[in-house]
Image (cartoon, grey):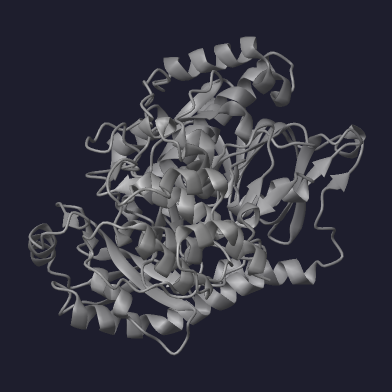
Amino acid sequence: MKHLNLKLILLLTLLFMTIPITAYSSPLSFLPASPSYDVIVIGSDPEGISAAVTSSRNGSSVLMIDTRSYLGGLYTSGMLSMLDMNYVSSNGYKPVNEGFFKEFYDSVAVNANIDIEKTKKYFTNLLFRENVSTVLNASLITPIKNENNEVIGVSYFKDGTRQNIRGKVFIDASIDAKFARSAGAPYKVGREELGMKNEYAAATLVFSLQGVDWSKVKSHLNLDKSIYTGANDKVAWGYPNMLNYTSSSKQFQLRSLNLSLQDDGSVAINAFQIFNTDSLDEQNIWENYDKAVNELPNVVEFIRKNAVGFENAWLHKYADELYIREGVRIVGEYTLTGEDVFNNINFSNKIAYGSYPMDLQATKRDFSGGTILTARNIYSIPITIMVPKLVDNLLVVGRSASYDPLSHSSARTVPVGMALGQAAGVLASYSIDHSLPVRTCSLDDFHVRNIQQKLRASGVVLDTPLNTWHPERSSWAYPYMVELRKKAFLSMEYQFKNDYRCKEPATFETVSKILTLIRANSSIRLNTANNSSSTSATLTNARMVTIFNQLVGTNHKTVTDLYNAHLIDEVTFQRIKNKSTLLNEDIYAMMYGLVQYAALSTP
């Protein structure tokens, strides 16, 4: 079986139930004769490799430990070969992540695409060349702490034998920060802050097909007159008709295809969504993996019949593990928020940038594949999101750093994770060289400036101008807009640009987009609203009264009735009561009132 090694790890976990899943608590003398490293990295995902190589280049002795049998994590065992790039602007292709990521990209990537087998070899050779010691096929990787809540070592099983290793700084690049959680780091899960604690973005089983006619794919997607599809010599994106795929289980959805051409002629596909995958439940993850593998023949047959260029394709291989997009996020010294992203906050202690769209992937079958809150929108990331509260000598990199669900929907991309990994590697070595805790270094302006200089010296760009133009702030409805977008109910993306279009006449499209976001990102119950007029017709007060009646089952006649029933507040009422037609900003304020009203009546 393709995931035999990982299943054996799960079996070993069950066999060793007598071993605590939390960290060992022991004085330093517990490890008198243990091997020792300056920096120990748990997990070989690209962000972990970035951290390990950077620490080694900064003079630290480094050990990397992983449960997998080969390096690369999401890029290799997860087959995620079409890169989610972060560009400076929405209409350009200048990357915001340079430094180690640029080095990696220039070595193995072409047109935002990597070859998986080439990447495996690159990572293996890189770690050997940079003197990073590596342990693969480890199991039960557990932190060892002292009485001061400091991580001082790591314990793991290899070939049936327990190994204990000393360390000075530990960098967790494991899936869902398993090491940090075992050490006692506080964390959030899924969409918890949005009132959806037990809901997660869909996981994906990436797979590849042979026999695809790439020239036919390119021609079709570049000539289909959609701004949301396209292709080049290495990657392609499109085929929205994939959402028509149905199965006997509501657990699956096929969204538009993200396609990556490999050197052997196969095409890797990121599109097969698997719902109800609990990132804290390993058994559930592997059960869903098996279910997805069993569903693959049906998925492939549907693609063959419904995607131009795939008529003669056949299944080539599938990933060794699921791509888990959303799971654990640690609570750090600072949590990057959606508002930080919307407002392009320029942190003085920044160590990286992100700009990928805020892409809240679907948590259930939605016939759209997810919701977008921004187009590309550059923002900065502070050093303190990597430093978990309560536990010392520990950093967390990758998608499990300290984000809220909205910022996570953008910053979860691997290029950002690799940028964090590089910063963590510099911070770890710097703290060791100065005999200071990583937390102290991350919170002190003097030390942060020194770390930033080291990052700049290694090619990281930290002086990119951020957007300071926010015309929506001058709108009378801006406070309502902020409250909507904090709940993921308002998007500023419009045709790949960021524009709330506050002063433009509102159409039913404005209402419809908000309703889609409410249904996707909350448990608020609303009825269906029908558009009885032209899609381009400007909304009026009378029409909005009808829409409100349809959504919440009332029978009001005028906007005065809406105000008296507390469906809109007084400020909104005074602004709109005498208007013959409504602008988008008016709709935003009205929809906020509707949300408040509906939330009170939703159990």
- Relative to the observer, which residue lies in front, 412 or 172? 412
Q: Is residue 372 left or right of residue 59?
A: left
Residue projecting furthest to the top = 446
Residue projecting furthest to the bottom = 248
Q: Is residue 49 left or right of residue 314?
A: right
* 506 shown above or below 571: below
Residue 172 in picture, x, y percent from top left = 63, 42
Q: Quadrant of residue 272?
A: bottom left
Mark yes or no: residue 410 visible: yes
Q: Is residue 299 left or right of residue 439?
A: left
* 244 shown above or below 197: below
Number of marks in the rendered image: 0
Question: Is the C terminus in the top left, top right, bottom left or bottom right quadrant?
Answer: bottom right
Residue 285 in picture, x, y percent from top left = 59, 70
Q: Quadrant of residue 558?
A: bottom left
- Relative to the observer, which residue lies in front, 130 or 292? 292
Q: Quadrant of residue 103?
A: top left
Residue 10 in picture, x, y percent from top left = 67, 69
* 559 shown above or below 93: below
Residue 98 in picture, x, y percent from top left = 37, 28
Q: Residue at x 43, y 75 (%)?
A: 528
Q: Residue at x 80, y 37 (%)?
A: 390
Mark yes or no: residue 281 visible: no
